[in-house]
Amino acid sequence: MIRIIAAALLLIAQPVQAQVIAESYRNAAGQVQDGIGITNIAPIRSTSVPTSGAVASANAFQSALSASPARKGCALYNTSTAAMLVYLGAPAGASAAASIPVPAGGSFNCGSFQGLVLTDQISVTSATAGATFVVVSQ
């Protein structure tokens, strides 16, 4: 029993550390590449367009951002004190059950770290008429 306790204390005192080392090298052009040949590329620059809005009617979805196949990114910020629902699609097809809840002061991002950007129309509603939001898109 004492050996088990001593072993457990040793593990707590010296946690296992994981380390991942990504192999990198320079190609013939002198560019740094990772182990699967992806070249480090400078970020794409884009101007953001902020748009503010408010929920016109409680529990009725409305468009917050039009669909755009050229979209590079977007975020919706709930600037009100009421929770909101975000639906990816047109207001006509929106339902609370198929929506993403965004708490008061919270946000919804239509991009991911993997480079995926949602290009759908974004619809929003709240149980509180007049609840405010800001959409920033590129």
Image (spheres, rainbow, N blue to C red):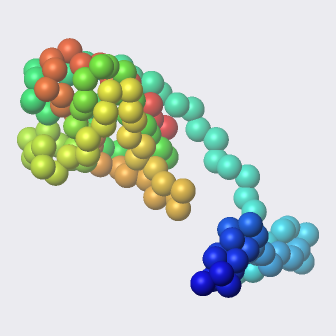
The correct choice, above or below, for 88 with respect to 102 in the image is below
Residue 54: image x %, image y %? 25, 18
Quadrant where the N terminus sits is: bottom right
Q: Nearer the viewer, residue 130 or 28?
A: 130
Q: Is residue 138 left or right of residue 35?
A: left
Q: Nearer the viewer, residue 16 or 19?
A: 16
Outermost residue toward the top?
130
Residue 51: image x %, image y %? 39, 23
Residue 124: image x %, image y %? 22, 34
Q: Is residue 61 left or right of residue 26?
A: left
Outermost residue toward the front?
2
Residue visible at 25% across and 29% down in the picture: 83
Residue visible at 13% across and 43% down in the picture: 96
Residue 34 visible in the shown view: no
Q: How many marks?
A: 0
Where residue 84 sits, quadrant-wise, is top left
Residue visible at 84% across and 68% down in the picture: 32
Q: Nearer the viewer, residue 31 or 13?
A: 13
Residue visible at 69% across and 71% down in the picture: 9
Where residue 5 sits, quadrant-wise, is bottom right
Where residue 18 sits, quadrant-wise, is bottom right
Residue 62: image x %, image y %? 17, 31
Residue 122 visible in the shown view: yes
